[in-house]
Image (cartoon, rainbow, N blue to C red):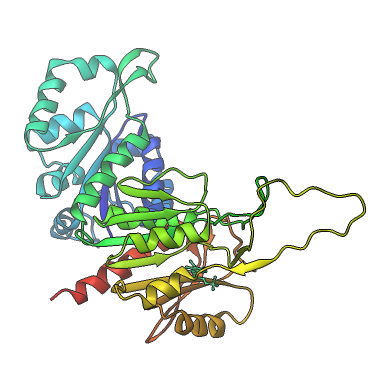
Amino acid sequence: MARILLIISGGIAAYKALDVARQLKRDGVEVVPVMTHAAHHFITPLSVEVLCGQAVHTELFQPGGESDIGHISLARSADAIVVCPATANLMARMAHGMADDLATTLLLATDAPILLAPAMNPHMWENPATQANVALLQQRGAKIIGPAHGDVACGETGRGRLADPEVILTAIRDIISHKQADLKGRRILVTAGPTVEPIDPVRFISNRSSGLQGYAIAEALAARGAEVHLISGPVSLPTPPHVTRINVQTAQEMYEACLAHLPVDAAICVAAVSDWRADTIQAHKIKKKGDEAAPTLSLVENPDILATLSHAEQRPTLVVGFAAETTHLQDYAQQKRQKKGCDWLLANDVSKHQFGGAENQVLFLTGSGVEPWPEMSKQDLAQHLADKIASFFHKEAP
Ligand code: C5P
């Protein structure tokens, strides 16, 4: 799990750091919060603590608490230190190597990448002293995000607004993924979304799959350096960063696209593939004809992509499936894992967690047992699975 040390210094934009913390937590990142004394005037440590899920550090020397040496090891174990907002004062002290409070001490002690998101009055930003400090920090390797142009809290307009939290997050995610490229060199296939099986030019058979879980998994794997090929049924989701997406409509197209992508190191079949399709697709819209009986739809079975990949000559080293059940979750899932021949199966009870929801709760089944995973967001589940996949390949490596 990636760990970010988030330093919040005392500016009016401090409240926006809460957004950044919340999003990072959603990405499955551990966020260790540090607040300067001045930051306490703008937001409460309690809000920060709740969003980060851990206590806020402020004091350099805390009676009965961690020693300063502990804090230094904290600074060194982080994947990155993010200062949001970074005030002119904090950057000035940093530029001059001061270590007169916890935040500056951590910044001086760390060997992790440092990301600064400045926010201040436009005149303060433009002041040659600030500009010289920023240039010095940049020269020493700190990455500066923003500030943005616009209205600032004191009523003036200019460059001084904290960069958009999304821009800050993208920069943090980039640092994490470079640092955590433990799936680099692995080629991974992910199927996601529903399939759509036409009946005639206007009608089709499909299901309610949103694609959220599969897309979150593709994103988490790509963020760790894997070369991800996402074979996707029709969904209304953006393609995750660094993922190659192949759009398909039918199960047959998904099947062919998957086989065309072999060999891969792993295949993660998350798609809700339609089990059947119409045996003939009518060239013209089926018309209602007076009082004749309703037409009957004759169905044929679609190929099972998961089972095919599990038994393929070029079988991926790791094949993972999903199973949606409404009763006898564990028994049915265990039988399904064996029948399909996949290595791992994530089974969820869709009577509780419906298609399209943001949360998921699964049983994680392997050849050696069952782990019940707690209820979590689909993003967290994706991170959890990516951890498992990374450690699987880590053990595999010669
Ligand atoms: O058999 P069932 O549809 O419940 O199995 C679910 C698992 O099998 C999912 O991982 C799904 O992506 C995969 N599957 C498939 N091809 C099918 C049907 C299901 O890959 N035709």
* Quarter of the rendering occupied by the N terminus: bottom left
Residue drawn at x 61%, y 82% as measured from the top left: 328
Q: Nearer the viewer, residue 311 or 349?
A: 311
Q: Residue furthest front?
A: 283
Residue drawn at x 14%, y 21% as measured from the top left: 131
Which percent across, then down, holds residue 177?
Answer: 24, 51
Camera sees residue 30: no
- Examine the rendered structure and indicate whether residue 167 appears above or below residue 251: above
Q: Quadrant of residue 209?
A: bottom right
Which percent across, then down, holds residue 7?
Answer: 26, 43
Q: Quadrant of residue 83?
A: top left
Tell whether 329 sits left or right of 219. right
Which percent across, then down, holds residue 53?
Answer: 39, 57
- Examine the rendered structure and indicate whether residue 146 appears above or below residue 275: above
Tell whether 132 sits left or right of 42. left
Query: Tag count in the figure?
Result: 0
Camera sees residue 169: yes
Which percent across, then down, holds residue 86?
Answer: 25, 33
Q: Nearer the viewer, residue 262 or 211?
A: 262
Q: Nearer the viewer, residue 306 or 84?
A: 306
Q: Nearer the viewer, residue 320 or 357?
A: 320
Residue drawn at x 31%, y 67% as measured from the top left: 266
Q: Residue furthest right?
A: 291
* Quarter of the rendering occupied by the C terminus: bottom left
- Examine the rendered structure and indicate whether residue 217 appears above or below residue 343: above
